[in-house]
Amino acid sequence: MPETLAQPFQKWHDFYLLSGTAAASLVGLMFVAISLVFRLITERSLPSLRVYVSPTLIHFIYVLVIATVVMIPTLTRMLLGVLLVLVGLLSFGRALVSIPYMRQQ
């Protein structure tokens, strides 16, 4: 049976719980803020919204996902590594996609 990471992460349980809760709250607040100014968003301001709001929102979501994944009691080192590499590749791809928008701004 593979060794799980539940024992080494036991001391960090509260940290991941608090950071995951904070990230979830901030993601919710971002959605509230965007919905409050929804009528002010025009076709012209949409690219700048993508450039400046999307990275913040995505990073909050990454913190939430990582905090959630680390809290899994049956998590193995291999699974954690694979998930973190996938998140890193997704982040890298997202950064490459947003380069034209950033140059345009």
Image (cartoon, rainbow, N blue to C red):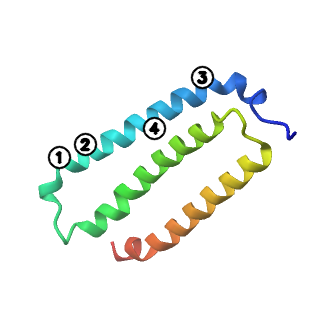
- Mark 1: amino acid: Leu
Where is the N terminus found, in terms of image quarters? top right
What separation in Å lies between label 2 and label 1 (alpha carbons)?
A: 6 Å
Element type at mark 1: helix
Cβ–Cβ below 8 Å for labels 4 and 2?
no
Task: Give the class, few, some or many, for how many residues have Cα within 10 Å of label 2's Cα (few <14, many ≥20).
Answer: few
Residue 28 as seen in the image, left or right of residue 90: left
Quadrant in the picture for residue 52: bottom left
Q: Nearer the N terminus, badge 1 or badge 4?
A: 4
Task: Name the residue beneath numbered marker 3.
Answer: 14
Task: Name the residue beneath numbered marker 2.
Answer: 32
Residue 54 position, x and y percent, is 39, 58
- Mark 3: amino acid: Asp
Element type at mark 4: helix
Question: What residue is shown at x 17% (from left), y 51% (from top)?
Answer: 37
Element type at mark 2: helix
Task: Give the class, few, some or many, for how many residues have Cα within 10 Å of label 1's Cα (few <14, many ≥20).
Answer: few
Task: Name the residue beneath numbered marker 4.
Answer: 23
Task: Name the residue beneath numbered marker 1.
Answer: 36
